[in-house]
Image (cartoon, helix red, strand yellow):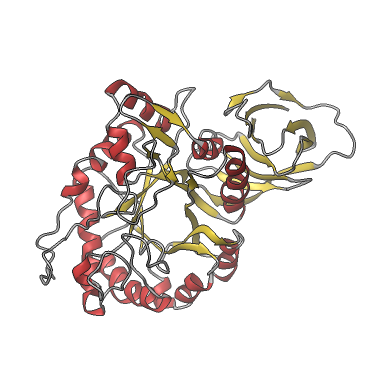
Amino acid sequence: MTLENWVTRGDQTALIEKQANLVSGTVTAGMPTIDVDSASKFQTMDGFGFALTGSSAYVINKLPAPQKASLLQELFGTAANSISVSYLRISIGASDLSPEVFSYNDLPTGQTDPTLAQFSLSKDTVDLIPLLKEILLINPSIKIMASPWSAPVWMKDNGSSIGGSLQTQYYAVYAQYFIKYLQAMKAKGITIDAITVQNEPQHGGNNPSMVMSAGQQGDFVKNHLGPAFQTAGVTAKIIIWDHNCDNPNYPITILSDPAAKAYIDGSAFHLYGGDISALSTVKNAHPDKNLYFTEQWTGANGTFSGDLQWHVKNVLVGSARNHAKAIIEWNLASDPNYDPHTPGGCSECKGAITATTTNYTRNVSYYIIAHASKFVPMGSVRIGSTDAGGIYTAAFVRPDGKKVLVAVNDNASTTTFVIKYKGSTVQASLTKGAVGTYVWN
């Protein structure tokens, strides 16, 4: 058994750098052993990637044409230096990482538009949609999830982009707003694979944001969004929750209503609170429904080594081991000042890429995702693997039959361990906090 392997170290002396092949043979006795079991099969992966926020699109489009073309091939292509990102999350209207607050149906105060006659994608036709089209030329099969941060303010009970809730009189209209969005994007050549009903429905302090209780979200899906999708022949998946791991009861409550559950593909999670095992709590309650990990940011004040170790352990390995089909970090790109963002939006969210008007550099979340996206294509299936001796792992079998193991050393010192597969054993080593991806036939 010969393992190809790539390593990223916390001190940045290796950045997804190919190492000498590891070959099976005699191993030191008593080493922690990672057992990989391809007979144990779990979820099929939809992909790994980032949020292509409005701001990400804005700063990438400011790059000179040669640098932009190089970056897009590196992110979405299949060349030797590419990381083959296979999943993107975008916002329906503005997120807090958009250059300004907007919806697709903004009206003067006091006006309403229940027929959505003034619906327009115009704000997204400047940067986001042209960039998505360029990405789709490189990877036509990339999956795209879309999430709203807020409904148009005239539909809300507080008349503000910040917080407030959707007025019940506009539930049916808001369902049509989703449909108009999906159809308008399709007309631009962009197919949205899935929508979440509301980004962070229990956080009303962001700009934009909107609060939805489990009861409200269940009602909206069961009586409005689900039936409207069905009537319109919309095939985009409906995904609920899209918030932290400290409240698995929110999606469980909605899924416990069979009439709502019929329209729902699954639940999405972030990890700004709670434990990643919350995904398995929901899976155990509703094993027929899917799980997605949709957001985790790296910040201006984080360290490369600390973020690499924590995110790979909890987000990449952790959510994969807890049944996530897609694993998405937060913003793809920002400028050196973590701009642009809305007034009150995240002012220290670090992009996977920092882009200037002349060039770009790679940050920690680029490497976090690359350790999976480059090696684990869409359609791969997670298989069994053990954790041992502070080494945390997730394993996959690819459509081409090759096996992939992603491992992170969560110890404070270099750790040597054994990778065992079907009776063959290979000895490997990772420095403290380092990440390795191992590939074999």
- 118 with respect to 20 (left or right): left
Q: Return the x and y of residue 156 as percentages of the image width and height.
A: 24, 72
Q: Return the x and y of residue 66 as percentages of the image width and height.
A: 31, 20
- Quadrant where the C terminus sits is top right
Tell me how many marks there are: 0
Q: Residue at x 30, y 52 (%)?
A: 342
- 72 with respect to 367 (left or right): left
**Residue at the extreme right:** 29
Q: Residue at x 25, y 74 (%)?
A: 158
Q: Nearer the viewer, residue 58 or 75?
A: 58
Q: Nearer the viewer, residue 363 or 129?
A: 363
Q: Quadrant of residue 234?
A: bottom left
Q: Residue at x 73, y 28 (%)?
A: 1
Q: Residue at x 34, y 46 (%)?
A: 53
Up-down relation of residue 102 to residue 402 (above or below): below
Q: Return the x and y of residue 373 as percentages of the image width and height.
A: 50, 37
- 272 with respect to 406 (left or right): left
Q: Quadrant of residue 351?
A: top left
Residue 39 in view in this figure: no
Residue 292 in view in this figure: yes
